[in-house]
Image: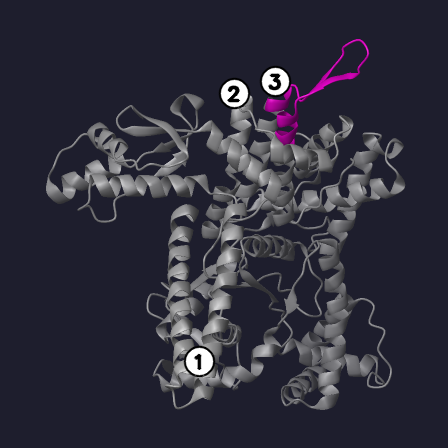
Amino acid sequence: TRHYCVTTQFAFQENEIKLLTAEIERLKNFGCLGVSPSLEGLRDENAKLKYRLNFLKKSLQEERSKSTKSMININSCLQEIFGAAIQAAYPDLENPPLVVTPSQQPKFGDYQCNSAMGISQILLKTREQKVIPREIAEKIAKNIPANECIEKVEIAGPGFINVHLRKDFVSKQLSSLLMNGVQPPAIGKRKKVVVDFSSPNIAKEMHVGHLRSTIIGESMCRLFEFAGYDVLRLNHLGDWGTQFGMLIAHLQDKFPDYLTVSPPIGDLQAFYKESKRRFDTEEEFKKRAYQCVVLLQSKNPDFIKAWNLICDVSRREFQKIYNCLDVTIIERGESFYHEMMKDIVKEFEDKGFVQVDDGRKVVFVPGFPVPLTIMKSDGGYTYDTSDLAALKHRLYEEKGDILIYVVDSGQSVHFQTVFAAGQMIGWYDPKVTRVAHAAFGVVLGEDKKKFKTRSGDTVRLIDLLEEGLKRAMDKLKDKERDKVLTPEELKAAQTSVAFGCIKYADLSHNRLNDYVFSFDKMLDDRGNTAAYLLYAFTRIRAIARLANINEQMLRKAAREEVLVLDHEKEWKLGKCILRFPEILQKILEDLLLHTLCDYLYELATTFTEFYDSCYCVEKDRQTGQIVKVNMWRLLLCEATATVMAKGFDILGIKPVQRM
């Protein structure tokens, strides 16, 4: 895809450069001959053309540079090649199936094209032609265009086309990776992605239920940023609503001088519970709470200050969590959209979508049995109104090309209805703008029930993270790492393991499913866990160091050495490393991050097979002295570690050099 699409883009840009150069020359001649009555106008036009020309030249240069440094998505390249072959073999066939996948076994080559079976069925259904898939596969194979990556193809079974890659092609791509680092394939036009994640409620502590949204959302943002998108990370805080009436009323009673002296609210959760108890049991307090809501919504300065004080206490607590998890996010709570809600209601009314039901203003969306309530009978707004306002703002003001909502599965019907309402009123076309609910399941305890404390309370997220730190340190001390690491290295390893394991345990499960939270499993250094991968990474990084090979020597070798891939384990590892771009492309499409975790585990185990079979550093068995360094194998180690490091970065995991 990179070869074909980018080449076409270059051709367009080069053609425009030629035309602009000719136009500038023409204007120059006009100016010299004095033909134009407005020389000033000519100069302006000339300047504009020159600016455009310089911009295009610079852009073309940057794209060429980026293109040559980018990792190639081999699967996409093969799809392009086989797409051309199928088009040549069956030019009259509309939208033929194009199926290219990595082979599961070496005897079936490196990749497989399995399109012949699908084409056979289409020919039978649409033209009543009975052609056996094997014949179709042979015809496709004969029409494969000249390319740099395929060594040979073989027809197997009923019509599978087994593809064998060229070793010099794979070796060249690995060398490029080592010289340029992990660079994502070019994405064309830079799109804007808005990701809504985390979203705790003010005056309530973050609990284990917020863990998944925060971790998954952060990782998605990192992936899109790495792929070259412009990403806006939004925290849709629950910072507005009737609950603030009771909180402000309670604040006035408990800290009457709050306007001049900052109230020492240490435990906001306890403060919330006290106000809720009073709201439920004291009628007078309840009335005053409702009055406080009215005054807050009318922007009374004293009540706005009280609201800000409560919000600030929560923000400080939330930030502690975000600092631990290395999360970057911009606060944009429900209050941000409050002024827009009146216009949202009016727009739906003006377009005839609003019905009145028992005093409420509701919107029925075709295909959804439950309507959206956009205004309550008392004139107040709802979550439906704020989510519609947020949707429109992200489309019209933020100009998002892709909107992603990382919210639990329990909200699926709600978001489907909101998105459908946005389409119904004409805010966006799903063929142009992608709006997705990245739903996720709940966190379960080891008893397979909703994760709770022994007393039955919801688990506070800060307590969970502190427990993770304690257990990680215990694990490191069990392995006597405290005896070989400096205090600073031990602390870094503790943080890396604790938070890395909590994140990976979540991300390595399909987000659509519930998952069981178990510290024992996530801290196990065997199997598909962060602990195993982090240990594997530090071991790989140590190989060159122990052979006294520094970074400068590796960079020199990457420029000069040819990566020999003669051993089957070298070949298997080289191909596995280069699958990284296609793994990322799949996740950009389906937003399922466990695919990256599965890939990193496969890469680590493939590396272990290679390291057990292929000597990177040969030593004298008697003296232990280094006899020979197989530099091309050390380069394979380096390429593996480079890809693993980028994978960790996308998952929000921080590896350490010594563990």
Dot 1 corresponds to which residue? 45
Say if 467 sits above or below 474 in the image: below
Q: Residue at x 61, y 78 (%)?
A: 335
Front-most of residues 455 and 535:
535
- Depth-wise, is mark 1 or mark 3 nearer the camera? 1
Give the magenta part as a residue range.
610-637
Q: Residue at x 60, y 29 (%)?
A: 561
Q: In the image, which disc is placed on residue 447? A: none
How many angstroms separate mark 1 from mark 3 (CA)? Answer: 67 Å
Q: Residue at x 37, y 76 (%)?
A: 425
Side (left or right) of 442 relative to 413: right
User: Could you tell me which secondary element the residue under label 3 belongs to?
Assistant: helix
Q: Residue at x 84, y 77 (%)?
A: 263
Front-most of residues 266 and 598:
598
- Mark 1 or mark 3: which comes first in sequence? 1
Would you identify the image quadrant in which residue 331 lies? Answer: bottom right
> Residue 468 at x, y = what percent?
75, 45
Q: In the image, which disc is placed on residue 613? A: 3
Side (left or right) of 99 relative to 270: left
Front-most of residues 227 and 494:
227
Q: Residues within 10 Å of mark 1 (few under 14, many from 20)?
A: some
Visible in this render: residue 403?
Answer: no
Dot 2 corresponds to which residue? 568
Visible in this render: residue 160?
Answer: yes
Side (left or right) of 111 relative to 317: left
Front-most of residues 404 and 53:
53
Name the residue type under label 2: Glu
Q: Are marks 3 and 2 in contact (CB under 8 Å)?
A: no
How many angstroms separate mark 1 from mark 2 (CA)? Answer: 62 Å
Q: Are marks 1 and 2 in contact (CB under 8 Å)?
A: no
Question: Does the magenta segment cover residue 617?
Answer: yes
